[in-house]
């Protein structure tokens, strides 16, 4: 019986083509919640991106696996009883370090952080020094702040491709030596990226799309390990979890949960790792995936009664 569903955001809940969650997907998430299933996010995004860019619009989730598993938390409120969506602060610029600044309805300070794994500082700085020499941009992601070493056309193009409309501030790289960093996102070609692995023996570069951005995370940490941290806190097993995704960084989680579902628009390797492939997101694929899970739960309930 599936008791929790983990949703990827980009390409799964939210099409790249429109940057908006289809109404059919919103209704499907709410159907799952009405059926008593917990709903969670599993994304490479930072939670402040989700908040600041309104990526999940008026939907609410019980748990968040963010930064490809580097930062994971649960919220105490019930999304089934929340009527209003959060309003973004007009002054929001990816910095919520001040004690009084909260992201309504999804701030980790309002819940329980169950996993946060910073990158080794010396390896972070090695990559940033390379970026300074080679003049490529890197997004630097702390717990409550996102910034860049520089902004150029390549970075702006990457932000446009994922429909981000807030450009992070530019700060000196020495800032990264003073605070824990949970992910770096270098913006460069695959060939240029080959200079990075020798600098990061304890980390890994994860490519999640066909674009020029990479997620730099700790080795052994991914969405699957983040899901495990959430499940341990909830005292649920992997067999009681489902996950829905489309990208290369979703392959591990789809292959390890009880039910892994790939979108019809997913990478071929992602579809191969899944138990089920639904239609593409723009053809109501997310709704199909959720309804498939609900139908399996109903059938299992009938078998148990029999």
Image (cartoon, rainbow, N blue to C red):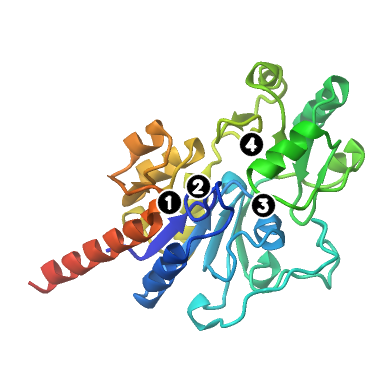
Left or right: where does residue 209 sit relative to residue 302? right
Q: Residues within 10 Å of mark 1 (few under 14, many from 20)?
A: many
Real-space Cα separation, disc 4 to disc 2, in angstroms: 17 Å
Q: Quadrant of the C terminus?
A: bottom left
Real-space Cα separation, disc 3 to disc 4, in angstroms: 11 Å
Residue designated by label 1: 281
Q: Residues within 10 Å of mark 4 (few under 14, many from 20)?
A: many
Q: Quadrant of the N terminus?
A: bottom left
The answer to which image quadrant residue 148 occupies is top right
- Which residue: 30% across, 63% down? 291
Upstream in the sequence, badge 3 or badge 4?
3
Residue 246 in sight: yes
Q: Is residue 258 above or below residue 176?
A: below
Residue designated by label 4: 215
Element under disc 2: loop
Element under disc 4: strand
Left or right: where does residue 257 sit relative to residue 107? left
Q: Residues within 10 Å of mark 3 (few under 14, many from 20)?
A: many
Residue 32 position in % (x across, y down): 38, 69
- Which residue: 50% across, 51% down? 8
Residue 119 in sight: no
**How many marks overall?**
4
Real-space Cα separation, disc 1 to disc 4, in angstroms: 24 Å
Mark 2 in CB contact with mark 1 (< 8 angstroms) = yes
Q: Residues within 10 Å of mark 2 (few under 14, many from 20)?
A: many
Residue designated by label 3: 46
Upstream in the sequence, badge 3 or badge 1?
3
Q: Nearer the viewer, residue 180 or 90?
A: 90
Query: Which one is closest to the eye, mark 1 or mark 4?
Result: 1
């Amino acid at each position: 019986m599936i008791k929790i569903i983990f949703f990827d955001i980009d390409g799964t809940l939210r099409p790249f083509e429109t940057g908006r969650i289809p109404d059919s997907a919103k209704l499907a998430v709410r159907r799952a919640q009405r059926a008593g299933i917990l709903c969670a996010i599993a994304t490479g995004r930072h939670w402040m991106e989700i908040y600041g860019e309104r990526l999940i619009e008026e939907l609410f989730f019980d748990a968040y696996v963010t930064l490809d598993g580097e930062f994971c938390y649960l919220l105490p409120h019930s999304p089934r009883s929340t009527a209003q969506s959060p309003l973004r602060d007009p002054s929001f610029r990816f910095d919520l370090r001040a004690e009084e600044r909260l992201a309504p309805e999804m701030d980790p300070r309002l819940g329980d952080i169950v996993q946060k794994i910073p990158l080794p500082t010396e390896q972070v700085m090695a990559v940033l020094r390379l970026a300074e020499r080679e003049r490529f941009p890197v997004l630097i992601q702390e717990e409550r702040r996102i910034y860049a070493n520089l902004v150029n056309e390549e970075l702006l193009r990457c932000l446009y491709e994922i429909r981000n409309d807030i450009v992070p501030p530019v700060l000196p790289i020495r800032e990264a030596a003073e605070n824990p960093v949970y992910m770096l996102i270098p913006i460069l070609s695959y060939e240029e990226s080959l200079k990075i692995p020798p600098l990061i023996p304890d980390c890994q570069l994860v490519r999640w799309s066909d674009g020029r951005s990479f997620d730099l995370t700790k080795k052994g940490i991914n969405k699957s390990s983040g899901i495990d941290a959430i499940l341990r806190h909830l005292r649920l097993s992997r067999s009681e979890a489902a996950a829905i995704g489309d990208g290369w960084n979703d392959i591990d989680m789809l292959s390890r949960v009880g039910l892994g579902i790939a979108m019809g628009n997913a990478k071929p390797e992602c579809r191969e790792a899944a138990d089920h492939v639904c239609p593409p997101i723009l053809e109501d694929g997310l709704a199909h995936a959720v309804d498939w899970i609900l139908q399996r739960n109903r059938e299992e309930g009938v078998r148990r009664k029999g």
